[in-house]
Image: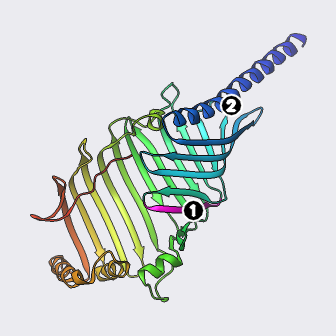
C-alpha cells in the first residue's frame, strides 16, 4: 500500500508539472504570436492573459484585443477571447467569443458582430506544423450592424471546414432564419409584405488548396484555392429561389476556369432587388429583362432561369458571349 501511495504521489506530481509546463507554453505562445505580428507592422494589442483550467484543462483568457493587418486592410477589436484545450492534448482548441460587440473594419466599411454562445473548435494534427484537421464555428442568435442599423442576422450559424486528404477540405455553411435587417430592407425598398427571413441559406463545397492549412497560414502566406467543387449554394427568400453549382480550377494568379450552373426561380424579383439597391442602373433594366427573358424561354419556363456559364481567360461567358469579368479568387 505504501508503494502504491508513492507511485500515485509521483504520478500526481508529474501531472502537475506537465500541466504547469503546458499552461505556461500556451500563454507564452499567444503572447509571442502577438509580438511577432507587431514586428511585421500589424497593430497587435493585448491587454492581458489570464491562465487557469487546472487540473484537466488549459485556459488562456485574453482581454483588450486589437488586431489590424495593413496588407489585407482588415482590423478586429474585441474585449475578451477565451482559449481552452484539454491538458492531455492542447491541439484540440476551443475558442469562446465575446458576447459583446466585436468590431470589424475592412475596405467595405466598419461593422459590429454580436453573437450569443459563439464558439470555434479547432482540431490540429500532432507535430510542429499543427496542420488543421477540422474547424467548426457555431453560434446562436447573431447580427451584423453598422451606423445605419442591423444589416443581417440569423437565429443560428454553422460553419465547418473538414480535412479530407492533404490540402483538400470540405466546407458546409448554414444559417437558420437568416434575416436581412431593417437597414438592408430599406435599401432594397422591400414592401412590408415581403418575408422577413430566408426559408433556407446553405452552402456545400470541396476546395483543394496549394497546401494544407497549418500554423504558417497566420504567420506567412495564406493557402490559395486551386480547385473548387461547389456542390450546392442555395438561397430561398419569398418568391426568389437561387441555386448555384460549379466545378472550377484556379490558376496561380487567382483566375478561375471551368463551368458554373445557375438556376433562378422568379428571376424578375432578383432584378427588382438589383435596381432598388442601385446595383442595376434603371437605364439597363429593360435590356437585362429582355436578355434574361430569352434565356428563361430557352429553358422551357419563362419564370425560371436555368443556364450554364463558362469561366475562361478572366471572363464569364454565356455560350460564346462574354458577359462579365471573372472574380480573382485570392485569399489575402
Q: Is disc 1 placed on a helix, strand or loop?
A: strand
Residue occupying image coordinates x 33% and y 67%: 243
Residue reaching furthest top? 3
In magenta segment, residue 111: yes
Question: Residue 50's spot in the image, x, y percent?
Answer: 74, 38
Q: Nearer the viewer, mark 2 or mark 1?
A: 1
Q: Which residues are magenta?
A: 108-116
Q: Quadrant of residue 147?
A: bottom right
The prevailing secondary structure element of the residues shown in magenta is strand
Residue at image mark 1: 112
Q: Using the image, determine if residue 159 lies above or below residue 169.
A: below
| Mark earlier in primary sequence (2, 1) | 2
Q: Is disc 2 placed on a helix, strand or loop?
A: loop
Residue reaching furthest right? 2
Q: Is residue 102 left or right of residue 296?
A: right
Question: Residue 249's spot in the image, x, y percent?
Answer: 24, 47
Q: Which mark is residue 137?
A: none
Question: Residue 268's spot in the image, x, y percent?
Answer: 29, 82
Residue at image mark 2: 87
Q: Assess disc 2: are there few (<14), some (14-19) or many (≥20) residues with their C-alpha within 10 Å of its C-alpha.
A: many
| 232 or 273: nearer the viewer | 273
Residue occupying image coordinates x 28% and y 70%: 263
Report the Cα–Cα distance between label 2 and label 1: 34 Å
Amino acid at each position: 500500500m505504501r508503494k502504491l501511495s508513492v507511485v500515485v504521489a509521483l504520478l500526481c506530481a508529474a501531472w502537475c508539472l506537465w500541466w504547469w509546463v503546458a499552461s505556461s507554453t500556451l500563454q507564452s505562445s499567444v503572447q509571442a504570436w502577438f509580438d511577432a505580428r507587431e514586428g511585421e507592422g500589424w497593430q497587435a494589442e493585448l491587454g492581458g492573459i489570464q491562465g487557469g483550467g487546472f487540473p484537466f484543462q488549459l485556459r488562456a483568457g485574453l482581454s483588450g484585443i486589437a488586431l489590424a493587418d495593413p496588407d489585407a486592410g482588415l482590423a478586429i477589436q474585441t474585449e475578451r477571447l477565451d482559449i481552452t484545450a484539454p491538458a492531455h492534448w492542447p491541439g484540440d482548441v476551443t475558442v469562446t467569443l465575446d458576447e459583446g460587440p466585436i468590431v470589424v473594419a475592412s475596405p467595405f466599411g466598419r461593422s459590429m458582430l454580436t453573437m450569443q454562445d459563439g464558439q470555434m473548435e479547432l482540431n490540429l494534427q500532432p507535430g510542429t506544423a499543427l496542420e488543421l484537421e477540422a474547424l467548426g464555428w457555431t453560434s446562436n442568435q447573431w447580427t451584423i450592424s453598422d451606423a445605419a442599423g442591423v444589416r443581417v442576422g440569423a437565429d443560428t450559424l454553422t460553419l465547418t471546414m473538414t480535412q479530407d486528404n492533404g490540402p483538400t477540405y470540405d466546407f458546409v455553411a448554414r444559417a437558420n432564419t437568416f434575416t436581412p435587417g431593417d437597414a438592408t430592407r430599406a435599401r432594397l425598398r422591400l414592401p412590408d409584405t415581403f418575408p422577413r427571413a430566408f426559408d433556407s441559406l446553405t452552402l456545400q463545397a470541396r476546395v483543394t488548396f496549394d497546401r494544407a492549412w497549418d500554423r504558417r497560414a497566420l504567420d506567412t502566406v495564406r493557402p490559395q484555392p486551386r480547385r473548387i467543387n461547389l456542390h450546392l449554394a442555395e438561397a430561398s427568400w419569398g418568391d426568389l429561389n437561387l441555386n448555384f453549382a460549379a466545378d472550377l480550377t484556379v490558376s496561380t494568379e487567382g483566375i478561375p476556369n471551368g463551368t458554373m450552373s445557375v438556376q433562378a426561380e422568379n428571376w424578375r424579383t432578383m432584378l427588382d432587388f438589383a435596381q432598388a439597391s442601385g446595383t442595376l442602373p434603371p437605364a439597363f433594366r429593360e435590356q437585362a429583362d429582355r436578355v434574361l427573358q430569352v434565356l428563361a424561354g430557352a429553358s422551357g419556363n419563362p419564370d425560371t432561369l436555368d443556364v450554364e456559364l463558362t469561366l475562361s481567360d478572366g471572363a464569364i461567358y454565356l455560350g460564346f458571349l462574354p458577359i462579365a469579368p471573372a472574380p480573382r479568387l485570392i485569399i489575402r
